[in-house]
Amino acid sequence: MATSIANNTSLLLPPDDFIREEINKYIGEVKLITLRFIQPFVSISGLLGNILALIVINRKSLRNTSSAVFITYMAIFDSAVLLLHAGNLVRPRRNLFIHCSSTYLTDLFTFCANWVLVIITLERHVAVTSPFLAKRFCTVKSARYSVYMLLTIAIIFFSTTFPIIYNIHGEPKRKKCIIRSEFELIHHIYQPIVMVGLPDLLLLSNLFTICSLFRQRKQQLSNREGLNIRISDVHSNRKQRQLTIMLVTVNLAFYLFSTPAMIAFIVQYSPPKHHELNKLKRRFLFSHISVLLLQLHNATNFIFYCLAGQRFRQATMETFNDYSIQLKFFYHRYILCDRQYRRSENYRLSNTSNTTGKHRASHPESNLRAANRALTI
């Protein structure tokens, strides 16, 4: 959808030469700012964030869950979308086949990224509301099968509809992949609905998930008063609650970025019927802002993971710590050629923390204090 919005940013200008000249000048200024500074920054920072998300979520402490599988594939799809946007920015010459391929892949990966988010939301709803069903369906194996099925359906769908909707034969004037005139209205209806509209409705299931979390919270407090509680249940519920809050925050980012872009895409279908210069400039500016909003949705998930996920933040700090130790070791051993440098001190500190954790686990009083502390969070 971002590619379609970008293709529509060239306005149907009125015949007035003065207005045409002013609009072209304004378009050049806006593109200079967005294409050379803002969009490259968003693409590069988003790629780095998605790579960090892939590294952190696949640590031993986080990777053996179905949500980790979904987050991994969503980061891959988001990275692919950002790479395609970056490719459109740096392409020196526009080739029809390359442009059509880029449009096809951008729509495909955007669809997959949005619907993986929907699957995560539904999976979290099942895990919170129906723990017995979660043991059967919310597994790593079922998560991978769900992503594979989604990707297969997306490839079949877009491979079938793309040659019908887009003009991929011949060369347009500007060598772009142009939507056929008879399918413009259909394209402006079905694409926002499939890409954003249906996910918006399905993501509302987060409301029921949050209500279930509050009910479970009240039940845990009542069990605490009756001392009818187990340490494993406390930690399991705390883990589910933190993971759910993190993913709900990412869903809010979807409403913050993708939904306004969908509204702008629908509004821009009808060409301007006025010749007011300021309104034409605002229309073009809103088109570029909507493209940036879609890119921000693909680029900011790592930030929301860190803001809302306590375990994700801890794993991120551990990742930075591990890589800093490896870089320091590489610097001393291979740059400074210090053969006596060892990492024994860091290993000793980590072993000390592990033995401390085992010592705490062997005392029931410490477990009770940990349970009380988990309930208060």
Image: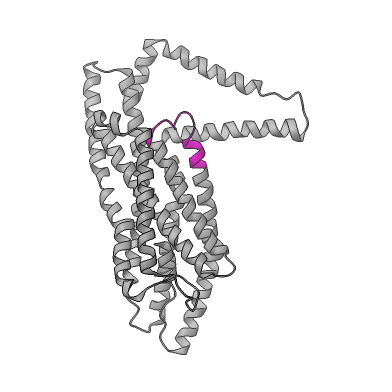
On the question of residue 78 being in view, the answer is: yes
Provide the residue span drawn in magenta.
52-66
State yes or no: residue 105 in magenta: no
Using residue 130 as the reference point, say whether residue 180 is left or right of it.
right
Dividing the picture into quadrants, the one containing residue 122 is top left
Image coordinates of residue 184 in percent, x first then y, are: 33, 72
Q: Residue 72 at x, y = what percent?
A: 44, 41
Q: Is residue 377 visible?
A: no
Q: Is residue 129 left or right of residue 114?
A: left
Please say if 205 is above or below 266: above
**Picture residue at 58% right of the left edge, 31% below the top:** 322
The answer to whether 217 appears left or right of 53 in the picture is left
Where, quadrant-wise, is the N terminus in this rendering? bottom left
Provide residue 182's location: percent of width, then percent of height. 32, 75
**Residue 58 among those drawn in magenta:** yes
- Is residue 248 or residue 179 the one in the foreground? 179
Image quadrant of residue 219? Answer: top left
Residue 345: quadrant of the picture: top right
Query: Can you say whether 10 is above or below 353 in the image?
Result: below
Question: As rendered, which of 160 and 249 lies closer to the eye?
Answer: 160
Q: Position of residue 164 (x, y in %)?
A: 36, 67
Instruction: Please state which of residues 148 and 40 is positioned toward the viewer in this rendering.
Output: 148
For the point 39% across and 39% down, which residue is it? 144
Colouring style: one colour
Give the number of marks: 0
Q: Residue at x 76, y 23 (%)?
A: 340
Residue with the most extreme right position: 337
Image quadrant for the C terminus? top left
Who's the residue at 48% across and 41% down the image?
Answer: 53
